[in-house]
Amino acid sequence: MKKIVLAYSGGLDTSCCLKWLQNKGFEVICFSANLGSEFSPADLKKRAHLSGAAKTYVKDLQKEFSDEYVALALKAGAIYEGKYVLSTALGRPLIAKHLVDIARKEKADFVAHGCTGKGNDQVRFEVTTAILAPKIKTIAPLREWELNSREEEIDYARKHKIPIKSTKEKLYSVDKNIWGVSVEGGALEDIGKEPPENSYYFVKPLKKALNQEVYLEIEFKRGLPIKLNGKSLDFLSLISKLNKAGSQCGVGRTDVIEDRVIGIKSREIYEAPAAWILHTAHKELEALTLDRETLFFKEAISFKYAQIIYQGLWFTELKNSLDAFINQTQKVVSGTIGIKLYKGNIVITKRISVNSLYKKELATYGRGDKFDRTLAEGFIKLWAIPFQVKN
């Protein structure tokens, strides 16, 4: 039998993929990457076995994900179209890298994924595979099979006794990792209506959010958080604590109309409390420590970096080159940012850095002002010259 390694999440799509590939004559080896999954390793292995997998690999990649993927995106300030912190998108190149490694180990000529024909993840998985292992072929069952809806997939799963959690009453597609949760499909496809309450995953709706202000202090070193409320924490633990605090305060949920790689617009719900808290604090610290021209230029780099992640181009020379620029900018991004969380809001309360470019004696309008106001008139005249030449 031909061997194929399937990127297996334990959800509806990949569970059906497993059985479908078997019926096509493949020996299916499953690979599950734990990036903060809703399923335990034991549960994943059991589900895969019951669905007919010949072998199942489960790898805990949470630390690699946080330290080598999320950390880079945070330093870059990568937020796609201003609303999506790229939680799912960031995980795909890492999963694809390990998928390729296992295919080589198992001497498999094929890999497979459970992505739809209109989604972004198919691009991310297949481009990464093509870059890292051009000779390995990718099969995408959801682009080939006869099933045309999630309702039909549920019927297929029940017919073949495949263990699933999805129901026809709650037809959401959910992807979860430490950096956030993506929720799409079902009732969310009607953009004329607000999301139903059953679409909330772990962020509290505002009416149920904690009715008190929560104060936090985050200390950064070279662009990365190292302490929370004065306590040293590794990045993964810090993310976990911020997710818990933010979710209780209703922070970090976005309802987005986004432009997919293939050209269509889609509605997505994202929940990412820690990501939004850290991005907000990081951006505030950059505003304090980076000079104006570097800050302005980095805005453009952040936009492009988010595109690169979103479009599945992680393992490219352009991304590596931008990393070099970003790391240079982060050398001065050290200090402490105080924030206040309340009913979905993230409010800055404190800014401290030894690299601060804010000088009170220049900014103040009170006593102690050392700004030479007589210089302003000449500056304004020079500033205006390029715009006067036509007159």
Image (tube, grey):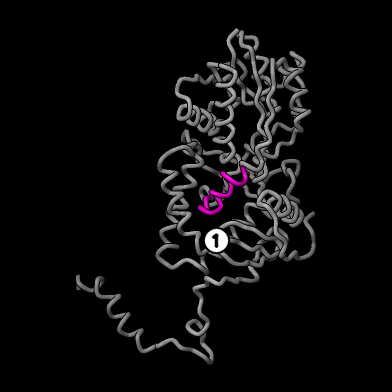
Task: Name the main secondary structure of what is drawn in magenta.
Answer: helix
Q: Residue at x 66, y 22 (%)?
A: 30
* 12, above or below 327, in the image: above
- Quadrant in the rendering for residue 103: top right
Q: Nearer the viewer, residue 366 or 173?
A: 366
Pick whichever, 358 or 255, lies toward us. 358
Relative depth, front residue between 248 and 171: 248
Q: Is residue 48 above or below residue 174?
A: above
Q: Position of residue 139 (x, y in %)?
A: 54, 19
Given the image, on which type of amino acid does mark 1 rest? Lys
Q: Which residue is mark 1?
A: 283
Residue 313, x across and y down, in percent: 46, 37
Asked if residue 66 is among those painted magenta in the image, a careful observer would answer: yes
Residue lying furthest bottom: 367
Badge 1 element: helix
- Taking depth in this image into account, of 278 and 99 the one nearest to the observer is 99
The vertical placement of 229 against 13, above or below, is: below
Residues in magenta? Answer: 65-78
Quarter of the picture containing the C terminus is bottom left
From this viewpoint, which residue is outermost toward the front? 105
For the point 69% across and 22% down, the residue is 56
Query: How far across and how far down the image is residue 98, in percent?
Result: 58, 30
Label 1, residues with CA under 10 Å away: few <14, some 14-19, many ≥20: some
Give percent across and percent down for residue 89: 56, 39
107 is within the stretch colored magenta: no
Q: Is residue 50 left or right of residue 382?
A: right
